Image (cartoon, rainbow, N blue to C red):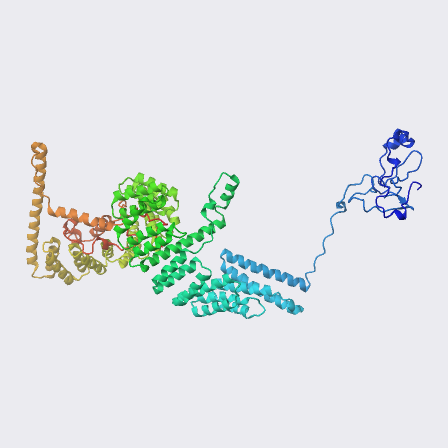
Amino acid sequence: MENVHLVPEEEEDDLYTGYNDYNPTFDSEDLHNDVGFQQAVRTSHGRRPPMTAKYPGTAIGGRPIGTAYGSRIPVGTAMGRPMTGAVQDGAARPMTAVRAAGYSSSIARGSVFDPLGQAKGPAPPLEKQNEDTPEEKIKILEKKVNDLIEESCLAHARGDLQLSLEKAKEAGRKERALVRQREQTGTADHINLDLTYSVLFNLANQYANNDMYTEALNTYQVIVKNKMFNNAGRLKVNMANIYFKQKNYTKAIKFYRMALDQISNAHNAMRIKIMQNIGVVFIHMGQYSDAITSFEYIMSESPNIKTGFNLILCYYAIGDRERMKRAFQKLICVPLDIDDEDKYIPANDDSHANMVIEAIKNDKLHQMERERKALAEKYIMTSAKLIAPAIESSFAAGFDWCVDMVKGSQYVELANDLEINKAITYLRQRDFKQAVETLKMFEKKDSRVKSAAATNLSFLYFLEKDYDQADRYAELAMSADRYNPAALINKGNTVFVKEDYEKAAEFYKEALRNDSSCTEALYNLGLTYKRLGRLEEALDCFLKLHAILRNSAQVMYQLANLYEMLEDPHQAIEWLMQLTSVTPTDAQVLAKLGDLYDNEGDKSQAFQYYYESYRYFPSNISVIEWLGAYYIDTQFCEKAIQYFERATLIQPTQVKWQLMVASCYRRSGNYQKALETYKDIHRKFPENVECLRFLVRLCTDMGLKEVQDYATKLKKVEKMKEIREQRVRSGRESSARGRREGSAGSGSSSSPINTPPLRASVSRSEAKYSPVLQQGRDSGQSNHGTSAKGERLSVKLKTLPGSNEPYEASTQQEIDASYVDPLGPQMQRPKTAVRKRTEEDEFADEELGDDLLPE
């Protein structure tokens, strides 16, 4: 303690006292003279480990230094002040200010370093909350209500409206149970009004989504009438929307105005939307002046595209030309608030900037901007097409005015599209010359417009069967834009009509590579494969097309026809059955089903479909003939009479139908009616041998006196027939002899051709009637048409008894070829979508292009 110097009290104010004093303890120059130090170096004292556990203290001042001569004493500071860890009066001074966290000099040797106290084991578990308390039960119930509201909203987002309504109802029940529980516990003052509002609002929304409008209105009324809910008056907008859906326009306007009164001017956007709704309701009510007032206010305060378009519609409805023009000018001046497309084009070699542009090029914001721009262009195009015929004396002058206005606006790109729509309007008015002239004006425009105009010109010339011009403009469209699928289709069509099917298929394939969703190219490719005989590839094309166009009657018919050509009648019947679900009144499809069932031997099903076909179109000769033969085959000759009488009305100069009527009367036992019918036939066709034979037979059986007269006529007619046949044979022999003489060397003279008129008539008649029933079908069908059907029915008729029956003896050679069907070939089938196509026209399915079609 003699080395410890206490600081005098009067020096306590001097903070820097003693810093310059010299302490001999730290003098290292006299260490070789220090006996204690030298002794410690020579003995084991210097190699002992420091005693850190016994004396807590700092690394320097708190641990006593032992020497060879005396006990360990703490070393004082330079001023003689006691060290931090010095023992005074037998008690160790606590070292708090200089002790590092987790370190202690008093830790026993060999102990584990554990500054965080992890060696003590895990913390004891938390005490479980007591869920039996009323407050905990209330909290759990509130959480269940919130979860049910969230599940209801998610179900609505997925489109499951029924589930969303059930969840909303369950949330309402849980919330009412929660309120009752709070009332029972005496905490009614703490009812969660926000939760009640959320439950009721969600329930009303789900009622409205499920078209339960009465329940939705009642729920909204509960919310609106409760004064404890803040801003509940805004929900009158929803109530007005429901009244609008119910077409209760008067109440809808009333509630819109009530909501408008309860919304302050600070919410201007909301007020504008309500005003727009009011204007739309006035349009539905036919009060265009009131609607104009609302829309004009909106266009002056916060103009937008939809309101501008509605305003033009109102002016058009009242026929105000000048205000239509002003409204159109306002419409094209509405700002879209979107970025320029040049922003998304890389302008330099900065890779980082290019990566950013690539990332935002197709993000949600850019997609929204494109949709907004497309919607604005649609409204402007529709407005121009609507008002063009009304604002000027002619629609051409009106279109020119609209084009001039658009060229001076931000929608300058629409000017060319308006010109093309002008050409399309000419087409609708059947003014093809003006349409062609308008489209030819685009030949010197930029590539996109030139390609569109040339595509339309090619389409027009193709319809006019000017295939050379169609090919020329198709080439021009392709040179302007090689990736235009409509141009490639038109080019393929011009090659198709030249029967170069392989090359046509290549153009259709290229169109599909450029636009995989181009249904016209896929349809035409299937028809091309069908012409080439590659039926499996054609089937694959039409199956793909059916996956895109599920209800296309033409595609279903082509699939049925291909399966029939592939000799799979069951699949053909299946596709025709699907086709009847799309076009149930198509008589030709029903007749085809009857034909297939007849080939399969199912007469009852065949009769059902033939009868349905006859019911929808009672002028199809092949159907009438089949039905008449069916009733004769089933021994119901009386029922067959009406069908053959119908055939007689359709083809009055065809003697065989009248002979069939008379034969049915005779078979049914009505000989008197049969005799009268035969006499009527004899008056119309006095040289008909079969009619005279049956007259002779009937008169003989009935014992009539006219039998001798008819027998004499029969002999004369048979004799004339023999003379005619003899002349035919002699004419053939002379012509054949002349050809032989000419081939033998005479050569210079041409022998006269004496063609029998009856034989030539048969040839012309068959050529005349055969394609009528084949119209709209492919020539590759094996048994679809008159010839196959006629042969099958002839076999049936010949199986009937009686060798001299008129319907057995009558042949095709006796049909009067001079007869012209009064109904015309187009009346042989109903005008349905499937029937409008002929095999030559079915591939011509190209459109004017999606961007060129009028709205």
**Would residue 694 appear left or right of 445 to someone viewing this image?**
left
Instruction: Report whether residue 842 is seen.
Output: no
Name the foreground residue: 309 vs 186.
309
Q: Write the residue at 34% across / 56% down.
A: 385
Give the total of numbered labels: 0
Instruction: Report whether residue 209 is seen.
Output: yes
For the N terminus, the image quarter is top right
Q: Is residue 741 above or below residue 325?
A: above
**Would residue 71 appear left or right of 604 to someone viewing this image?**
right
Q: Is residue 613 above or below residue 517?
A: below
Q: Give coordinates of residue 310: x percent, y percent.
A: 40, 61
For the C terminus, the image quarter is bottom left
Q: Give coordinates of residue 294: x percent, y percent.
A: 43, 65
**Would residue 136 appear left or right of 493 to someone viewing this image?**
right
Q: Is residue 796 above or below residue 326?
A: above
**Would residue 25 appear left or right of 805 to someone viewing this image?**
right
Name the foreground residue: 324 vs 139.
324
Q: Quadrant of residue 376?
A: bottom left
Q: Quadrant of residue 682?
A: bottom left
Q: Give coordinates of residue 701: x percent, y percent.
A: 12, 59
Q: Write the residue at 11% across / 61% down.
A: 702
Q: Give coordinates of residue 231: x percent, y percent.
A: 55, 66
Name the foreground residue: 509 vs 757.
509
